[in-house]
Amino acid sequence: MCAAVFAIAIDRAHAQDVAPGAPLLEFAVERNNEQIGFHRIRFSREGDSLVVDTEVSVRVTALFVTVYRFSHRAREVWTGGRLVALDAETDDDGTPHRLSVREEGGALRVTHNGETSFVGAGLMPTSLWNKAATDQTVLLGTLRGDAMPTRVTRLGAERISGPGGELEADGFVINASPDYKRWVWYDHSGRLVAARLLGRDGSLVTYRLR
């Protein structure tokens, strides 16, 4: 892969100074109303930096046979409101992705499966915990570290089912080229409270906050 700096005007991403509402966000991942896994996001502090640890585990079965498996672990480090480091390991149904991102010389150095390239500094990853992702025109993919042109559509305020009953949340559709699409909802504090996507077979996958 040839190294190239992604030159495009983007909005600078700013992480929240504190974890959004709680040190842990935990979602049940459901497909066709059946739980198939979990998605956890933990927030902590290391000096002046915000550290975000994500763990995802999904398994789809049919007639007691696993037909799809996905696992993902990632750590983001934010300093001064910007992403300075990201490390992730993903197994997408047998396809491995090992990703390392570091801020370097006014850009982000991306190493994916041993190949290095550069993208513009200030990109926000597709981890989606930060509502500021809905203000971006380019997002950083957390599988390959690619710069993904992004279009966001606002859905407006909706009532969303939460662990303590219904709550009001702002909904958005995030389309990131070439094949990333998520429906996401944030409460008034900016906390991610729900998400949806379509599986490879067209089935609806829902993230429900526990």
Image (cartoon, grey):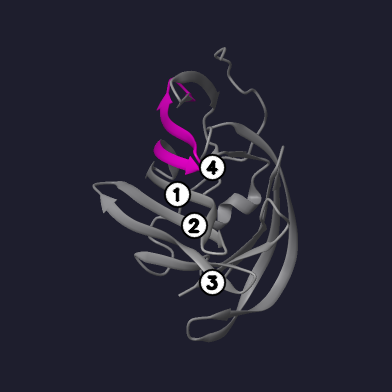
Residue contact between numbered discs 2 and 1, judged by CB atoms under 8 Å? yes
Residue contact between numbered discs 3 and 2, judged by CB atoms under 8 Å? no
Looking at the rendered structure, the kind of residue marked 3 is Arg
Separation of residues labelled 3 and 1 (CA atoms) = 18 Å
Q: Is residue 23 left or right of residue 15?
A: left
Name the residue that disc number 3 marks: 208
Q: Earlier in the sequence, mark 3 or mark 2?
A: 2
- Pinpoint residue 177: horizontal percent, then vertical percent: 71, 38
Q: In this picture, which residue range is highlighted in magenta?
A: 86-108
- Snapshot quadrant of residue 83: top left
Looking at the rendered structure, the kind of residue marked 2 is Val
Name the residue that disc number 1 marks: 71
Name the residue that disc number 2 marks: 58
- Tell me if residue 177 is in the magenta stretch: no
Q: Is residue 60 left or right of residue 75?
A: right
- Snapshot quadrant of residue 20: bottom left
Separation of residues labelled 4 and 2 (CA atoms) = 24 Å
How many residues crowd mark 4 within 10 Å: few (<14), some (14–19), many (20+)? many
Looking at the rendered structure, the kind of residue marked 4 is Met
Please give the label number shown on residue 124. 4
x 52%, y 30%: residue = 121
Q: Earlier in the sequence, mark 3 or mark 4?
A: 4
- Tell me if residue 102 is in the magenta stretch: yes
x 73%, y 69%: residue = 156
Q: Earlier in the sequence, mark 2 or mark 1?
A: 2
Please give the label number shown on residue 195. none
Looking at the rendered structure, the kind of residue marked 1 is Ser
Look at the numbered disc 2 and give the secondary structure of its residue.
Answer: strand
How many residues crowd mark 2 within 10 Å: few (<14), some (14–19), many (20+)? some
How many residues crowd mark 3 within 10 Å: few (<14), some (14–19), many (20+)? many
